[in-house]
Amino acid sequence: MNKAGSCATVSTRLNLSLSLSLSLSLFGLYFADGKRKVDYVLVYQYRRPSSLHESPGQHRLSVISNGSFPRVGSKEPEGVKEEHAEVVLDMGPADPAEGEKIMIREEFEANLREAGLEMERDNEHKVHGQGFIRVHAPWQVLSREAEFLKIKVPTKKVYEMKEDKGLSATMSAVWRKLNQPFQPNIPHLQQQSRTKFLSHSFSRDKLHLCDEWFPILHAWFLKTLTFALRNYFGEKIGLYFAWLGVYTHLLALASLVGIIVFLYGCFTIDSNIPSLEMCDETQNFTMCPLCDRACDYWHLSTACGTARASHLFDNPATVFFAIFMSLWAVMFLEHWKRRQNSLNYSWNMTGMEEEEEHPRPKYETLLLQKRQRKRRNRKKNKNEKLTWRDRLPGYFINISSILLMFGVTFAAVFGVIMYRITVSALLAMSQDPQIKSNARVTVTATAVIINLVVILILDEIYGSVAVWLTELEIPKTETNFEERLILKAFLLKFMNAYAPIFYVAFFKGRFAGRPGDYVYIFNDYRMEECAPGGCLIELCIQLSIIMLGKQLIQNNVFEIAIPKLKKLFRSLKEKKRAPEERVEQTGRALRQWHLDYNLEPFDGLTPEYMEMIIQFGFVSLFVASFPLAPLFALLNNIIEIRLDAKKFVTELRRPDAVRAKDIGIWYNILSGLGKFSVIINAFVISFTSDFIPRLVYQYMYSETGTMHGFIDHTLSYFNVSHFKAGTAPASSAVTVCRYKDYREPPWSSEPYQFSRQYWAVLAARLAFVILFQNLVMFMGVLVAWVIPDVPKNISEQLKREKTLLVDVFMNEEKEKLQLIQSLFSKEATQTRQQQSPLSHECQMCQMLLQISLFKDANPHRQHTMTCSVC
Amino acid sequence: MNKAGSCATVSTRLNLSLSLSLSLSLFGLYFADGKRKVDYVLVYQYRRPSSLHESPGQHRLSVISNGSFPRVGSKEPEGVKEEHAEVVLDMGPADPAEGEKIMIREEFEANLREAGLEMERDNEHKVHGQGFIRVHAPWQVLSREAEFLKIKVPTKKVYEMKEDKGLSATMSAVWRKLNQPFQPNIPHLQQQSRTKFLSHSFSRDKLHLCDEWFPILHAWFLKTLTFALRNYFGEKIGLYFAWLGVYTHLLALASLVGIIVFLYGCFTIDSNIPSLEMCDETQNFTMCPLCDRACDYWHLSTACGTARASHLFDNPATVFFAIFMSLWAVMFLEHWKRRQNSLNYSWNMTGMEEEEEHPRPKYETLLLQKRQRKRRNRKKNKNEKLTWRDRLPGYFINISSILLMFGVTFAAVFGVIMYRITVSALLAMSQDPQIKSNARVTVTATAVIINLVVILILDEIYGSVAVWLTELEIPKTETNFEERLILKAFLLKFMNAYAPIFYVAFFKGRFAGRPGDYVYIFNDYRMEECAPGGCLIELCIQLSIIMLGKQLIQNNVFEIAIPKLKKLFRSLKEKKRAPEERVEQTGRALRQWHLDYNLEPFDGLTPEYMEMIIQFGFVSLFVASFPLAPLFALLNNIIEIRLDAKKFVTELRRPDAVRAKDIGIWYNILSGLGKFSVIINAFVISFTSDFIPRLVYQYMYSETGTMHGFIDHTLSYFNVSHFKAGTAPASSAVTVCRYKDYREPPWSSEPYQFSRQYWAVLAARLAFVILFQNLVMFMGVLVAWVIPDVPKNISEQLKREKTLLVDVFMNEEKEKLQLIQSLFSKEATQTRQQQSPLSHECQMCQMLLQISLFKDANPHRQHTMTCSVC
């Protein structure tokens, strides 16, 4: 897309210090008359005189919207909400079609004027640089748009809200106390007061009902000074922070339970029979070698460390925690729905209706081209639109690119596996015992770091590719564009972040074969197996490093360092500019809009949400293997909220305030992740952890009913004479070695076949998956059903407000009727006394009747109110 | 509840013949002045003179609402919609508190008059019998209520809807053609026209915008004459029939696929190897006896018939059909959501908001009692309401009753099982070979019929119990009451209808033990086993008989015979009444309301929905075992729709029209059933049918890769010498008999233990359940995602309408502004010419400004329009 065609928005960087804001109000927030407020600022750039064209002083300005720009030309629906927002139409590189641009700009300004907006521009005739046009939206425009948008405003009528009583009141008080430290320290004007102003869709007819205490609309907008997020940034960004708040609050709960589960693991580690048995050197299990030829037989007790560590995460409490976290995800979504509905209510958004959206410029351009083509082919079709035929190439490229990128992701995972296999093999062949003993740790650590780096790089690439692919689809509206972009970006980034984790959880070690019949890759390298302590501990390491690394690096590098670097770069560029210009600028006092223009433009909330959703995946999907994940997420978010807030207020141009009722497609993604997490956790517990084999052993095979002998039971026998030629280790003292699997011993009738235990354990694992999934889903439905979407007090208040409003209007109507009747009777007496210009008065009266509020006449009935003066 | 306190509604039985409706309009549809229409009729009954009280001519009328009666006293919100509906306040048995009743009735009538309604009563002074008060709702009342209810009415503005083009247009045309026979044969006034009148919430201010072609509200109501269901009965009943229509349409699709699956079974029956092997007499499997002592060993080939029959339902196509039906359920729900949204749009219900509902009289009574008690205890509390403490006894009785009824249901199922076991045992001991050979058929058939009768009886009992239990809970509003009643009734009736089917599907034969170690009930009777052909054929028989029997009996007996009987009974009672009264009545012409009063009152839609939902359960839950279920449901529904329509139009009093946007809790129940059906079908296929064992055999154990040898593989060996003493049959030629199970043979090291095959098959079954459930759930989500809730053209039209409406208002505003300005300038010139009563004119002008539509003045700005005449 043509960069010149993008128009960006600048925020009035209302610094939070009062002194500055006071000086601002005197210096740049008003038109020259000091009365009319600056509501928007348009920016264009004068052409440099060194350019090819003549006519100095001509300036270019593009009107093609980047979508976050409200439909100024047509209806200006955002105008009402964003009194203080300023729109900057950015200028692109020099372009030959200069004349056309000027025409477009003039048409644009004319449209603004026709819509009733007032404009002011600098008097001085600059040669080049930025020119600013200030726009003021007068009262008429604001009130008209407020009426069309059905914006709800408070009326004079006050009513008392129901008090919380008893237990719930105490609990909410305690909750508020607990929350205090997490809340920003701002003066709360809209305290938890017991009274509420009845609100009603704005209507100029009903203006007299509006509360004067709040001096109607303008005063209502002045509440921006409370600095509450929504009032300053609009509902869409307000909803993001509210969502982040709910998520973080609930993470605190999850962290607490996670810590308890972890502590349970810590405290029971010394009483856990399987890990004690593994560490017991007297049991002396001789294990088959971990690699061909180079590795020797080894004793299981040497893996004691990982066995103990794996108990920290692989214990019965984890099962409970997985169930808890699945329900937690449901609870989170339900709580968010409630919160969203509460916010909609207190932000008076309940009656908001969807607007018809303008098509994106690119869509319109293509449509125009298509029409011209059609006209040439003499086809007529009024309701022309882009069909799937026009989009076919785009879709094709889309699908193939996405498949390609999936391929890249899998290739990256496979590459790391290959790295691990080959390096392990190389290290195993090393003669240095030091290297040999640390081989596993070295390989695992380096592999995970490679994984992490690959993920971070691909993440950035996929982000850009998703934008490019979505452009190719030519979505009709900006909402369409955003939804498709989010879905694609999510799909790609999700795959990218989770593919290695999925591999470790469900595939690693499953296809390694058995002694004497190992699986080889490229005919040379044995497939890798999990550590002797089980796959769960490896999953845990993988998960924690990727999660922490991703958060730390993305938070620090991408969110702090890179913006700082960009700013530095811009200021350096600024310094290189012609010095006389700078003198000119600094000579005059810098207005607020000059300062704001230097800030970063606002890119939308997608990256913020994406980061949190991927984190939500870490917290919910594999939580069975890493109960501390919610804790790390919580710590990250407490920092994140502050960084985000600082960024929004001081480092970005002020975003356009956009009305929104919900968080859109993110909710669907969250809910999908929540559902997916149930099945993933079921599989992690039953297949990755040793929970089910232990249960089966204890209740089906153990003779004492305890876990004693479990380790022996999970190890199969292998006759070393069955090793393939050249793969056996040199040591010859051993005749039978053990390996972890449920297979028949060499002396059975079907040696090395899966044993009856194998099938029994498999059946138990699968039964557990079914049980877990259905139980959790059922409990989830129950939780969702118990927590109503709309808080009860709000649904009651909504209905109550409606009833009260009807009463208010009824009373008002009666009063007016009386007023008019008294006026008419006065009229009549006066007329009878004067007996002069009767026909004139009658005319007035008729007119009054015709246009007044009381024209409730049915044309087919004859009881219209008649003028007594006629 | 006091029966006297119920108030019922009567329908104006507008017979569909035009002649009758014409005569009606002359005779009873208008007040005596022939102009004002009768909108409601109130009925009360004169006390018989033979009663204890004196004062003849006094009459009683109760105002306690049964909830379907609109809140006439307060706001009369339904008044607008139900122009032709008539309310009858029914009279109860004689009551001593006569005076109080009269007071209540007078207060009620005064309230009606205050709300603006007009009334007319018969002049004659009857001694006893019914008295009718006709109510007329004048234009003012209608328009006021229309405004409060935000009823949308068409405006003058017409716009063209987008045409369907290409494939979708052809398809919808074909669909319409195909549907023709299912549609009632009524003149379609609202043809598929391309234009639509822009509609807008009714507002008296905007009345001049309303279309005069449709003479506004009254004419709009006249559309009732199209006899479209919704226009005649209101949205709630309209939605029921629309829902039934969508369901029946989609059943046609399901039936078609079901028939194909069934035919597949029929055609492949002769090529099915397992059933051929079972019928093959040369294979000669000697089976262990089916009962102790009395039964002999038998040959498997004698069970050839059931084996062949079970192939009809137990074949690979069934698996496909189960998946199809699960997706069908999702599709049905999604289609219904779309249809509902379409209807909401075309019925102009899109802006409908929820109303605050009045509490039920019983709730208010109890609240009053509580308050009085409190006042006596000198406690003060303004916002008094009933808490869970007040409801505790009710909840307690509820839970215990529901548990009791579950117990009754299980007891009934268990009773039938006992019947089967004992009678089978008795018949087996019979000496008559005729009886012996037919034993199984006799027992099964009689048992299912007993089951059916028990289900039908309990169904009626549970219906009444649910009402009683819900009353005990003291729900606050009528909506609450209905929801709780529906949930309870559904739970009880669902358990009742499905408990025996669940038993056959998942429990029958699972706990029978094995030869030599059978399970006995009451130490004497062996637990029953499934027929040799498998459990699926038994499930199929059970399901089909219960489903068909329930539908036939409930349709014929309960919906036709019982109402007929009731009518007969009423007319007999009528005949017994004092003959002089009849003479009196027949002497005068019978008005429409006399005829209508003789019809059955309308009981609500709950029984209709319940019947269909239970049917939906039969169609979706166990469809894997009976692919013809949708066909039978379809046939039933085609009859049902006609019976229902006839009943509503000719046999019931006309129900109150009630506005509704959706089908309420029924949707949740449907969606719950749909989800439940996925898991049930997964279990039926994997555990009830032989699908998985066959697959496992073919791919794991079969040496040829075909099904040959499957029957042999499923049969275990039993050494007859291991029979417990006294249980072996007399025949001694047999040493080893076979039985259906996967157990080790007598000669293995662990005789009669579950074999490795058993565990492998179990694991495969469970894996199939997981695969099926998740695959179908995922596809369901996909289907739900592909089918948008709101049809695209409707969401587009909604947005377009909004834009158009804004344009209309903008134009209107401009015109008015011009009108006023021209008037004022005329005013000014006139004033200047006359220079007389200036202050008076100025006064008028100020008033005009103050109350006119154009008071868009912001009190804090000074550019208010000023009167030029002042």
Image (cartoon, coloured by chain):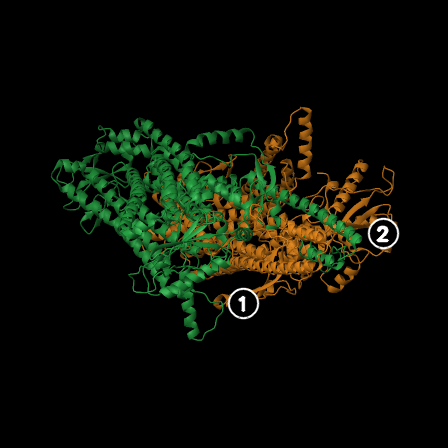
Chain colours: A green, B orange
Residue pointed to by mark 2:
B582
Q: Residue lying furthest top in this view?
A: B377
In the displayed structure, A86 sits above or below A327; it is below
How many residues crowd around disc 1 within 10 Å: few (fewer than 14), some, or many (20 or more)? few
On the image, the x and y values in percent for residue B446 come to 59, 47
Observer-nearest residue: A511 or B467? B467
Residue A687, above or below B166:
above
The image shows residue B382 at horizontal and vertical percentages of: 64, 31
Helix, strand or loop under label 2: helix
- What's the residue at 36%, 51% (across, down)? A489
Instruction: Identify the residue at horizontal 46%, vertical 67% (top origin).
Output: A384
Q: Is residue A150 left or right of residue A24?
A: right
Q: Amino acid at mark 1?
A: Ala
Q: Is residue B735 visible?
A: no
| Number of numbered discs | 2
| Label 1 sits on residue | B173
Residue A769 located left or right of residue B72: left
